[in-house]
Amino acid sequence: MTVPTVASPGPTLLLAPARPPDRLGEHLLFTVVVVLVIALGYLAMWRGWRRRARRVQSLPPLPELASPRPEPLPDPLVPPMPGVYIGSVGAGGWQDRIAGRGLGRRAGGDLVVTDQGVDLAGLWLPRTALAGVRIGPGLANKVVPGPGMVIVGWDWDGTPCESAFRGQASRYPEIVTAVESLLTGAPC
């Protein structure tokens, strides 16, 4: 009996897997679309800020120009509260940030309530301009959970505005009471 011999298959050829079709054109098109969407977004934001700045230019001078901040500040009715001035909004709502005249910036400082007005980290609001005070969760596109921030309402030559200050939440009630005493004329 003869044993069959098995022939060796010879050298094996390693074939590269099939290459997917070239998609360079699709990738370039996708990149161009993404860049255009980003550019349009920036353009829309730029136009929005310019529109806000134009609205502020039509407003009268700030109350501090009509009634300058007293130097030195009178004795505070309650101890100053350190914190952050969040910003100011106009009559358009809690997200309608006033972008010009220094009102759109955030700034660290103290909230000081005196018998002549309220100083919010450098923004002087004379007693005659004050319109209200409350504790709220958000203002000027800033939302804070819990007690939030002290929001002081004031009148800008017929335009109602609100400015927010975030500090030590446990002190909010005494600050609100002090500002309310300015509004009613009652002693603090």
Image (cartoon, grey):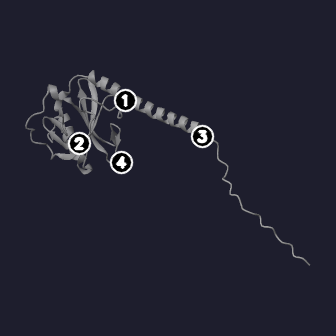
Q: What amino acid is found at the position of numbered circle 3 in the picture?
A: Arg
Write down the residue under mark 3. 23
Nearer the observer: mark 2 or 3; the answer is 3
The residue closer to the viewer here, 56 or 152, is 56
Q: CA distance from mark 2 to mark 1?
A: 37 Å
Q: Is residue 46 above or below residue 175?
A: above
Residue 168 % position (x, y): 24, 49
Circle nearer the N terminus (3, 1): 3
Quadrant (top left/top right/bottom left/bottom right) for the N terminus:
bottom right
Q: What amino acid is found at the position of numbered circle 2 in the picture?
A: Val
- Which quadrant would residue 53 be assigned to in this image? top left
Q: For the residue carrying disc 1, how many other residues have a C-alpha within 10 Å: few (<14), some (14-19), or many (20+)? A: few
Write down the residue under mark 4. 145
The answer to whether the residues at label 2 and label 1 have Cβ atoms under 8 Å apart is no
Residue 117 % position (x, y): 16, 35
Q: Identify the residue shown where x is 71% and y is 61%.
A: 12
Circle nearer the N terminus (3, 4): 3
Q: CA distance from mark 3 to mark 1?
A: 35 Å
The residue closer to the viewer here, 126 or 132, is 126
Q: Identify the residue shown where x is 16% and y is 29%.
A: 64
Q: CA distance from mark 3 to mark 4?
A: 48 Å
Write down the residue under mark 1. 46
Q: In the drawing, what numbered circle is on residue 176? A: 2
Q: CA distance from mark 2 to mark 4?
A: 19 Å
Circle nearer the N terminus (4, 1): 1
